[in-house]
């Protein structure tokens, strides 16, 4: 199966600075990589995703990069704001038995200090 | 648009009692359905997934079971809860294929 490693587990940044979260995956056949944001006590929400035929994708202050050769992908948040504080999960798709399962990283707790 | 519902939102149950959590999806057909558990401050653990009615796959051996009696209904059950079953239970759905999963609001279960 797939294995996803995520670093760092915690990250503190000053408001306005950038934050970078990195993930690696093991299955070279994985071709879909979403990122989720989970605020305290709430459900994970999809914030951005990338497919294997794309190297980078941006959505306002959020960007994701993918290096298929090295099997790693990263989330970049620029001009961080206090409302960006949350736990972020990366994931990689794993295909098995007709179902496309997401394997999640263990999460990064991002704290943005005003 | 698609909507996913879960109930109850919170539940406090004694050890050894049964459990039934329900998840329903609206606005789509033939979805893949998933049950996850999240312990406090931890990541997402996939418990079960289903690609169709009556088709359930288990990822982790445990005292929980799942059923899919209808296309857009997914139920998580237990005959006897353990303390270690406490956690935040999330149902999710996705279209068939390598697509994003959308999570329900979750059920917070406390086993006492």
Image (tube, coloured by chain):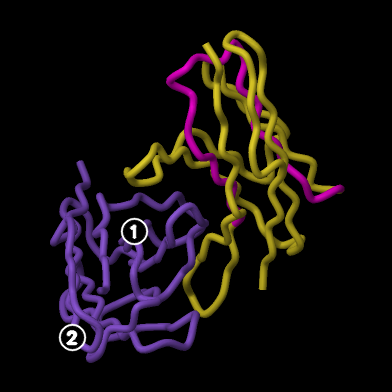
Please tell me in which quadrant of the rendered image residue B51 appears. Answer: bottom left
Q: Which segment is the magenta one?
A: A70-92
Q: Residue at x 64, y 38 (%)?
A: A10
Q: The yellow chain is which one?
A: A
Q: How many marks?
A: 2
Q: Mark 1 points at which residue?
A: B92
Disc 1 with disc 2 on a shared chain: yes
Residue A16: in magenta span: no
Answer with left or right where residue B19 lies relative to residue B32: left
Q: Residue furthest front?
A: B112
Measure the C-alpha gap from mark 1 to mark 2.
Answer: 25 Å
| Residue B38 position by quadrant | bottom left
Q: Residue B76's quadrant in the figure?
A: bottom left
Q: Which residue is drawn at 60% across and 39% down?
A: A50
Q: Mark 2 points at which residue?
A: B17
Q: Residues within 10 Å of mark 2 (few under 14, many from 20)?
A: few
């Amino acid at each position: 199966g797939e294995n996803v490693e995520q670093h760092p587990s915690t990250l503190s940044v000053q408001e306005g600075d950038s934050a970078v979260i990195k993930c690696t995956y093991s299955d070279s056949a994985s071709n879909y990589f979403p990122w989720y944001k989970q605020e305290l006590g709430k459900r994970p929400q999809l914030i951005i995703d990338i497919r294997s035929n794309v190297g980078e994708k941006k959505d306002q202050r959020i960007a994701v990069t993918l290096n298929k050769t090295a099997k790693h992908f990263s989330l970049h948040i620029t001009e961080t704001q206090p409302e960006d504080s949350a736990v972020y999960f990366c994931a990689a798709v794993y295909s098995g038995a007709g179902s496309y399962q997401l394997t999640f990283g263990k999460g990064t707790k991002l704290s943005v200090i005003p | 648009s698609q909507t996913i519902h879960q109930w109850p939102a919170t539940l406090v149950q004694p050890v050894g009692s049964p459990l039934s959590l329900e998840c329903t999806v609206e606005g789509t057909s033939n979805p893949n359905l998933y049950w996850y558990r999240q312990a406090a401050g931890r990541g997402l653990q996939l418990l079960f997934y289903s690609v169709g009615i009556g088709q359930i796959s288990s990822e982790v051996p445990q005292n929980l079971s799942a059923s899919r009696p209808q296309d857009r209904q997914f139920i998580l059950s237990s005959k006897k809860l353990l303390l270690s079953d406490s956690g935040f239970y999330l149902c999710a759905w996705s279209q068939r294929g390598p697509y994003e999963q959308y999570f329900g609001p979750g059920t917070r279960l406390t086993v006492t």
